[in-house]
Image (tube, rainbow, N blue to C red):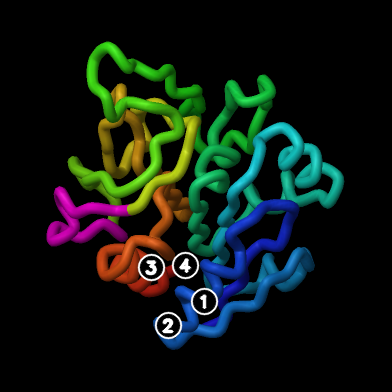
């Protein structure tokens, strides 16, 4: 199985590669269009800022390539946000794979001390609807680090709540995405990555 991780100007790519290595899968980090297009699985991770990252994707033609992929694609963190239609971060039009909007958390210190921005740490996911989220993952804890979130919508595959309910994961056709970091989520994250790797074209 050929797995590629999309190389672009965003952080956290090596940690995803290392997580796959722990599962016995050697992924290639590349921006080569042919290698991405012919891979069995594509992972689109990232930590960074939406507007500058979208500008880079457009410069490299990845903004056209990624939405046209037909094999299973997994976006992670910033990857999920960029797969949505629009982000409030930099008022940025995104890839439009998912119709959901990306908004910034507004801190609610008067409601609960923990409600600070960014949302950082372990939180549980629920209402799982995607094939890569098996029933044993319901209410399990995964690791988040983010200041922006995707609305709940038609493509919500898992929910989480922090200040407001939001999409912890999205899924549409061959496109999957998690706001949390499966590569940093221990056993639960490993299970999600394994499930993604088992998905068919």
Q: Which residue is mark 3?
A: 193
Quick one: 88 or 61, which is closer to the camera?
88
Q: Position of residue 5 (x, y in %)?
A: 61, 67
Q: How far is disc 3 from disc 2 in space, using C-alphas?
A: 11 Å
Q: Describe residue 31's horizontal placement relative to residue 2 as left or right.
A: right
Is residue 137 on the magenta stretch? yes
For image coordinates 30% across by 53% down, the residue present is 142
Q: Are marks 3 and 2 in contact (CB under 8 Å)?
A: no
The first of marks 1 and 3 along the sequence is: 1
- Nearer mark to the viewer, of 3 and 4: 3
Q: Which mark is residue 201?
A: 4
Residues 201 and 86: in front is 86
Q: Are marks 1 and 2 in contact (CB under 8 Å)?
A: yes
Quadrant in the picture for residue 157: top left
Task: Tell me if residue 46 comes above or below residue 27 in the rendering.
Answer: above
Mark 1–mark 3 distance (CA, rounded to whole Å):
12 Å
State the SS at label 4.
loop
Residue at point 22%, 46% (across, down): 124
Task: Please give the residue where the numbered disc 2 appears in the rendered image.
Answer: 22
Magenta residues span: 132-142
Q: Which residue is mark 1?
A: 18
Which of label 1 and label 4 is nearer to you? 1
Separation of disc 1 and disc 4 at Cα? 24 Å
Which badge, 2 or 4, is on the more N-terminal residue?
Answer: 2
How much space separates mark 1 and mark 2, taking CA atoms?
6 Å
Task: Give the mark nearer the N terminus: 1 vs 4.
Answer: 1
Query: Decide: marks 1, 4 in contact (CB < 8 A)?
Result: no
Q: Position of residue 167 (x, y in %)?
A: 35, 35
């Amino acid at each position: 199985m050929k797995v590629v991780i999309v190389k672009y100007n965003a952080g956290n790519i090596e940690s995803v590669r290392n997580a796959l290595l722990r599962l016995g899968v050697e992924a290639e980090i590349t921006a080569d269009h042919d290698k991405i297009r012919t891979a069995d699985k594509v992972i689109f991770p990232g930590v960074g800022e939406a507007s500058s990252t979208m500008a880079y994707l457009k410069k490299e033609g990845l903004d056209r390539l990624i939405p046209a992929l037909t094999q299973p694609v997994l976006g992670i963190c910033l990857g999920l946000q960029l797969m949505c239609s629009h982000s409030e971060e930099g008022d940025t039009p995104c890839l439009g794979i998912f119709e959901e909007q990306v908004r910034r958390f507004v801190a609610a210190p008067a409601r609960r001390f923990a409600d600070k921005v960014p949302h950082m740490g372990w939180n549980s996911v629920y209402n799982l609807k995607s094939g890569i989220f098996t029933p044993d993952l319901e209410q399990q804890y995964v690791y988040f680090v983010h200041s922006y979130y995707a609305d709940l919508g038609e493509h919500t595959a898992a929910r989480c709540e922090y200040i407001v309910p939001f999409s912890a994961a999205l899924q549409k056709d061959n496109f999957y995405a998690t706001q949390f970091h499966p590569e940093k989520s221990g056993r639960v994250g490993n299970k999600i990555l394994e499930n993604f790797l088992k998905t068919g074209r």
